[in-house]
Amino acid sequence: MSTPWFLPAPLIDIAAIALWWGLLAISRRHDNRRLRNGILFLLLVGSAARALLHLASLIPALKLPVGLGSVAFFLLIALMPFLLMFNGVVLIRREGRRLSNLLCLAAGLGLIATPVAAAALVATATPWGLLVAALMFCTCAYLGVFLLIFLGQTVVQRIWGGRRAMPHPDVVVVHGAGLINGRVGPLLGSRITGGIDAWRDEDALRPGVPLLVMSGGQGPDEPTSEARAMADYAIAHGVPAEQILLEDRSTTTRTNIAYTRDLLAERGMVDPQVLLVTSSFHAVRTAILASDMGVPWAVTPSRTAWFYIVNAWLREYIAVLTYRRRPALVCAAVAGVFAVLYALLALGAQAGLIG
């Protein structure tokens, strides 16, 4: 009996899925907080999508659902600029016209304006217009690929990070956020609540063992440290004061981790199981920083208002983009070399030196 003609394609699909799944599993076991997991997850999703399209071509019953799914996906991509602008308007109405709240609106407008500007430059048919359009394309491609990687890593962290990676923490650390008129606001309150829930779950199994660390210094416009306000909030919600530690010097995510590590070391805690609690949009960057600093701590997200997540997530994406300067510098160097070569060729053509 001869081998069916369609057999090689499914075998290739199965092999690709198995390969990327295996590499992702190995990478996650080593450290599920690294951005390479996001890359492997995207490759796995791409292989699975390719396999699904092949199956739809072989099984008629799958053609309609796969076709509708494809249409929905491309419709979402087409509507993305308008969805971002809508979210930006909602955020501004609810949170005010601060510069940090304009990111969604700016991203939506940029997704519309950039292709229009590039098309206008190409339409000029001039060497310099084409050069600028090419550089715009390279920049957008780099930013888009990094955005997809960051999105993939976000999914990896939500599936395999958090409480799943650290089911029985010795220490639960809540990262601070700014106080509002000296009091705990909704965003910080959500983080503290998530920390209290994780602490209570473990305290029910090991009474009196887990500690709850409140991490946050005092800003110039704050009457007290965030850690002190957070501790008072936790005590008011039933956490014993003797189970709470204060880390009240940090002003950034990096110092949150560093000073908490020092605080635990001062108490003689060697390699404790630590679970960091922060907002959902902030979890991936916190996990990347913890990995960069060499601490094996997991990060679990707390709930965040829906209208706030996208804008804050984009802000975190930009922050992580600045952490990974080397790929950006390499891409900029390559683009710069091509730009210089292109400019020399264009000048040579204009001077008649190149036919």
Image (cartoon, helix red, strand yellow):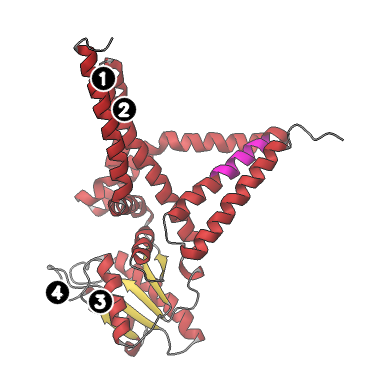
Quarter holding residue 124: top left
| Residue located farthest toward the right when viewing the structure as drawn | 1
Which residue matches tag 4? 223
* Front one among 32 and 100: 32
Mark 2: secondary structure: helix
Q: Amino acid at mark 1?
A: Leu
- On the image, the x and y values in percent for residue 6 come to 73, 34
* Front one among 154 and 186: 154
Which residue matches tag 3? 227
Q: Residue at x 28, y 22 (%)?
A: 130
Residue 97 visible from this viewpoint: no
Image position of 133 with respect to 322: above or below: above
* Main secondary structure found in the magenta portion: helix
Q: Amino acid at mark 3?
A: Ala
Say whether residue 50 is left or right of residue 217: right
Q: Amino acid at mark 2?
A: Ala
**Segment tinted magenta in the rendering:** 46-56
Which residue matches tag 2? 134
Classed neighbour count for the residue bearing mark 4: other residues with Cα under 10 Å, few (<14), some (14–19), many (≥20): few
